[in-house]
Image: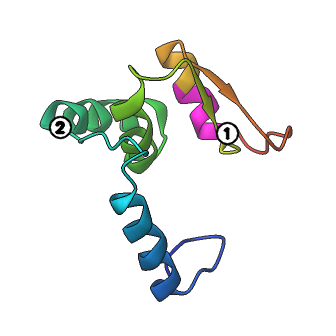
């Protein structure tokens, strides 16, 4: 299985990632050493997993609004002045 939570067969997850990588209309942003350092600093300070920061930090300068139902992103968004909208409309957790 590929993901914690929603169970997706590995072959299906790999196919999705491959389509994303090949799609020229989807902007890909590199994770730099500076971003990794920042994530490693922020994670223990906030008690939010480093992977959440590694998803958010590389794109923060390119977005005005982020969409997520993960309450950790709401906290991260507040730290970086980016609005986080929950498309489900209900926050569960911090």
Q: Nearer the viewer, residue 15 or 60?
A: 15
Q: Secondary structure at mark 1?
A: helix
- Residue 28 drawn at (x, y percent): 33, 44
Q: Which residue is mark 1?
A: 71
Residue at the image position 38 percent from the left and 19 percent from the top: 61
Please tell me which residue lies in front, 3 or 38.
Answer: 3
Which residue appears at 43% of the width and 66% of the height? Answer: 19
* Tags 1 and 2 touching, CB below 8 Å: no
Quadrant of res 25: top left
Q: Is residue 1 magenta?
A: no
Residue position for label 2: 32
Q: Is residue 17 above or below residue 35?
A: below
Q: Residues in magenta?
A: 71-76
Residue 75 sits inside the magenta stretch: yes
Q: Quadrant of residue 60?
A: top left
Q: Is residue 38 left or right of residue 48?
A: left
Q: Majority secondary structure of the magenta segment?
A: helix
Q: Mark 1 and mark 2: span between their CA atoms? A: 25 Å
């Amino acid at each position: 299985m590929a993901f914690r939570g929603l169970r997706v067969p590995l072959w299906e997850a790999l196919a999705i990632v491959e389509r994303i990588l090949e799609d020229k209309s989807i902007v890909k942003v590199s994770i730099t050493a500076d971003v990794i350092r920042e994530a490693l600093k922020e994670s223990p300070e906030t008690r939010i997993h480093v992977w959440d920061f590694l998803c958010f930090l590389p794109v923060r300068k390119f977005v005005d609004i982020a969409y997520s139902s993960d309450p950790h992103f709401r906290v991260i968004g507040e730290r970086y002045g980016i609005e986080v909208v929950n498309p489900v409309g209900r926050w569960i957790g911090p």
